Image: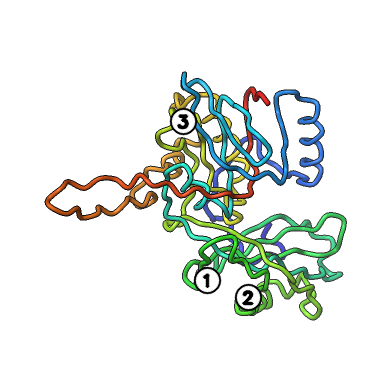
């Protein structure tokens, strides 16, 4: 791993999984869609706008309403990505999470002298907090390098609707400087393919992640605040999400995940923004504001277990 990646040290912390390995993500996605198409109780509904979710009167199932109708499910996993803030507001959960707009990626041609080296997927955080990740391109001689969130230098945006789709030149310049300092022996720095668009990413204010049940819904709704900045944990995230769905929280997490699962709790101090009390006239006690602002957001919702259309 350190061949051609001298900035990576062997003593970096990580989560060792006994069944870990390399995955061809493109092939995996194709195979999963084929398997899903053959499984009657799993649906893929792209480009659908979520409107609301309610618990059915007997509290055994959840009723979801979208711009294409409605359906019911035993449990729901929400992976809203850039829409996490607005999505959770519809469920009464005000998260302390920020949204960022990042340049998509820069592509560099690999030098002939490094063509025999195995290119792995890697991520790295520099001393000043700049965060980068590298990926080998499928069937090409290019290396894809992407910036990740650095909360100390990047500006937040209020909503996905405020996306400009114009790459921030300051982020690109810092990235080019870092690449020139650390990868000049393996890639051609003279003619990179520059990004022409952006991607949205979100991160909790404490820079952590949530994999937990959404409060007040009887363990029927699970939230994952997945982020491109958490890409190195994705295999572990998938198994944890599956357990939250299948075990109703009864697992003691006595294995490898026991040391990290508490860090993914929604109830960690500061992750939920509590409403400020509103002073009432004539000494009347404070009451909660019952007004709900409903957002229509575009996202993919993953349904596990049986689903009735």
- Residue at which label 2 appears: 168
Q: Is residue 12 above or below residue 292?
A: below
Q: What's the image's color scheme?
A: rainbow
Q: Mark 3, mark 1: which one is toward the viewer?
A: 1
Residue 114 marker:
none
Left or right, 161 with reference to 137:
left
Local crowd at mark 1 within 10 Å, few (<14), some, or many (≥20)? some
Left or right, 300 with reference to 35:
left
Kindly report the distance in space between the C-alpha atoms of the residues bearing marks 3 and 1.
Answer: 36 Å
Q: Secondary structure at mark 3?
A: loop
| Position of residue 32 measured from the top left corner of the image (x, y, whole percent) | 77, 35
Q: Which tag, 3 or 1, sits closer to the chain's start?
A: 1
- Residue at which label 1 appears: 154
Q: Is residue 108 above or below residue 135?
A: below
Kindly report the distance in space between the C-alpha atoms of the residues bearing marks 1 and 2.
Answer: 10 Å
Q: Secondary structure at mark 1?
A: loop
Residue at 41 percent of width and 50 percent of height: 94
Kindly report the distance in space between the C-alpha atoms of the residues bearing marks 2 and 3.
Answer: 42 Å
- Residue at which label 3 appears: 253
Q: Are marks 1 and 2 in contact (CB under 8 Å)?
A: yes
């Amino acid at each position: 791993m350190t061949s051609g990646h001298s900035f990576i040290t062997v003593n970096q912390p990580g989560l060792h999984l006994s069944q870990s390995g390399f995955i061809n993500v493109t092939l995996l996605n194709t195979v999963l869609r084929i398997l899903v198409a053959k499984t009657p109780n799993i649906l893929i509904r792209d480009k659908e706008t979520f409107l609301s979710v309610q618990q059915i009167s007997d509290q055994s199932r959840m009723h979801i309403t979208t711009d294409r109708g409605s359906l019911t499910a035993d449990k729901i996993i929400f992976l809203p990505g850039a829409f996490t803030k607005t999505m959770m507001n519809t469920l009464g959960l005000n998260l302390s999470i920020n949204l960022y707009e990042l340049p998509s990626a820069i592509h560099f041609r690999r030098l002939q002298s490094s063509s025999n080296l195995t290119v792995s997927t890697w991520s790295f955080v520099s001393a000043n907090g700049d965060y980068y990740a590298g990926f080998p391109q499928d069937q090409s001689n290019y290396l894809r390098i992407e910036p990740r969130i650095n909360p100390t230098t990047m500006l937040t945006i209020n909503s996905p609707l405020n996306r400009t789709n114009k790459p921030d030149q300051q982020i690109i310049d810092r990235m080019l400087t870092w690449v020139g300092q650390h990868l000049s022996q393996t890639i051609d720095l003279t003619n990179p393919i520059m990004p022409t668009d952006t991607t949205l990413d979100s991160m909790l204010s404490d820079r952590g992640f949530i994999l937990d049940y959404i409060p007040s819904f009887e363990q029927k709704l699970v939230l994952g605040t997945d982020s491109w900045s958490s890409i190195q944990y994705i295999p572990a995230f998938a198994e944890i999400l599956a357990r939250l769905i299948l075990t109703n929280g009864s697992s003691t997490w006595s294995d490898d995940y026991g040391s990290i699962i508490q860090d993914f709790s929604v109830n960690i101090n500061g992750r939920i923004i509590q409403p400020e009390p509103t002073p009432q006239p004539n000494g009347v006690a404070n009451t909660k504001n019952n007004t709900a602002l409903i957002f229509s957001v575009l996202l993919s919702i993953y349904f596990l277990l049986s689903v009735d259309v």
